[in-house]
Amino acid sequence: MPLQRSSREAGAAPADSIASFDTGTSSLPARRITLTLVLIVAALALVWFVPLGWRHLVPSDEGRYAEMAREMFLTGDWITPRYNGYKYFEKPPLQTWANALTFAWFGIGEWQARLYTALAGFAGVLLAGYTGRRLFGPAAGFGAALVLASAPYWSLMGHFNTLDMGLSFWMELTLSSMLIAQSGAAGKRETRLWMWACWASMALAVLSKGLIGILLPGATLVLYTAIARDWAIWKRLHLASGLVIFFAIVTPWFILVQLRNPEFFHFFFVVQQFERYLTPDQHRPGPIHYFVWVMLVGFLPWLSVAVQSMRHAAREAARPNGFRPATLLFVWSAFIFVFFSVSHSKLVSYVLPIAPALALVIGAYLPRVSREAWRRHLVGYAVLLVAVAIGAIFLGRMGSAHTPNALYREFRVWVFGAVGVAFVLTLAALWVARRARGSALPSAAVFGAAWLMLATIAGTGHEAFGRHSSGALIAPAVKAELARLPADTPFYSVGVLDHTMPFYVGHTMIMVQDASELDFGVHQEPQKWVPTIAEWVRRWDADRYALALMPPERYDALAAEHVPMRVIARDERRVVVEKP
């Protein structure tokens, strides 16, 4: 059956269609359906937002972007981003602006640092539901939101303070706006407004992470046009007014930051946007199949219906105006996947913008899964959860000097709890599937809750590692010592860049010997760092007051050379010392 719907269904679908999820069964009262959907969204919001402050920030992204926002908020410089006191032009400032505003409104803390990311992820779920409803009907919209919310890739990334969730939301809005505007169901005025939203969201994507915000959607559109032979779409893009909106949003910051920092243009556009992609200088290599495993694990709950979903979407008939939504979804997903797979720099979060497109494809098929196929799906995943629980036993045998075995054993308890909850909910989904008539969606909602809770509980349990890697356990002792010393006391970071300690102690550090990713900043302001250990020792001896952070092995070497140091605090990864 094709995905195409009538214009009435693609727009404001009647209440009985929503109630029955397009299954042909008798409808429920519209008020009851509305209340049910409100309760589902409220429950999702509780599960999504309440745990934000239950974990400490972990290196490197979470500590980095939280500290950048803290410095922006305290200094009042909203044009030149800085990290640890040094100019930091690797990424545009949209998320730093958002986090700094969050600190201004709610105070400085962990949940505040994650709020923008969480809002982007939550809004992405609602947007997927709305887009699916407009394109393929109410049941497909509910299915798309369900798939995206329960995909571990999306739910976990929505709770870490990284740039990719914000980027992915704005790119999802770009894609959704294009799909709705071009579907043929909207009038001329609505089409124009959705295309303006598309151009605006591309601009915000650029301000989130750079040129990929327009490069990826633009290349996708060109490839879609060639594959679908849908040349008429270019007449409906509102190019002139859209470009005005795009540049009106993008241009001001780029001009202001370049005027204040003449070195910005070359570093940002040449080094970060092109050399980062084309060369292995970032030391983030990965095999060509790197993202295959990311997507398999990230969409694990829905793998058994993924192939059928793609087959179903491939049979979609073109809309009356020649537009093919499913083809655009396929091209979007394939191009982004290939683009990052051939890159020399790879991180797990890079292909996150694919997730909403896949959720729309799977969500459109989900209401059509047969009862028998759905029962097999649930039984298979119940068996998988048992296997995961057995495999989790071996977590108790892992450990290293930096990550002691006790932390793995603590995390294992959370994994057992997460798998246990997911297993019980999967059994509940089986029970609902036996009792429900028609659509598998009610049972799928319970199954989706199982995987959302699994990711939430296991993700929260990561705090077993996070509180140690963050340095938060020793931060109070360091803050107390800093409060006792003069405000201009130098705090050195010797041979290492600690991504979380500046945020937790509320104090930037002077880099010594190894500038790490702050290499550009220290070369722009060389007076702000110490290039060698020998020079640092001389400065340390001359300082009346001073603190320093260093790895344990560095401390041992310096202590053997009788450098005067008094240990304030230490853990498995770092030692903080004071000048006696």
Image (tube, rainbow, N blue to C red):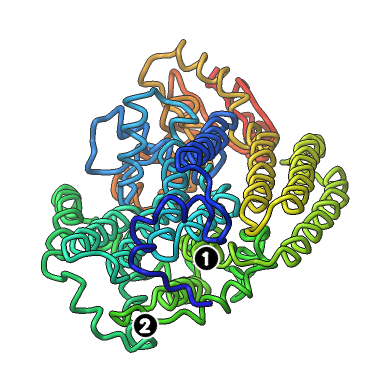
* Quadrant, the C terminus: top right
Q: Position of residue 571 (x, y in %)?
A: 67, 30
- Residue type indicated by callout 1: Ala
Q: In this view, does 287 lie to the left or right of 141?
A: right
Rendering quarter of residue 197: bottom left
Q: What label does residue 74 carry, if any?
A: none
**Nearer to me, 254 or 512:** 254
Establish if 561 lies above or below 370.
above
Q: Where is residue 211 in the image (x, y as percent from the top left)?
A: 31, 64
- The residue beneath circle 2 is 223
Q: In this view, does 247 lie to the left or right of 143?
A: left
Residue at image x 45%, y 54%?
A: 129
Residue extending farthest top: 484
The residues bearing labels 1 and 2 have C-alpha atoms spaced at a distance of 23 Å
Establish if 266 lies above or below 228.
above
Residue at image x 75%, y 37%?
A: 414
- Residue type indicated by callout 2: Leu
Judged from the image, the secondary structure of the residue bearing numbered disc 1 is: helix
**Nearer to me, 436 or 564:** 436
Q: Position of residue 195 (x, y in %)?
A: 23, 63
Residue at image x 64%, y 45%?
A: 449
Q: Is residue 334 left or right of residue 273?
A: right
Residue extending farthest front: 26
- The residue beneath circle 1 is 364
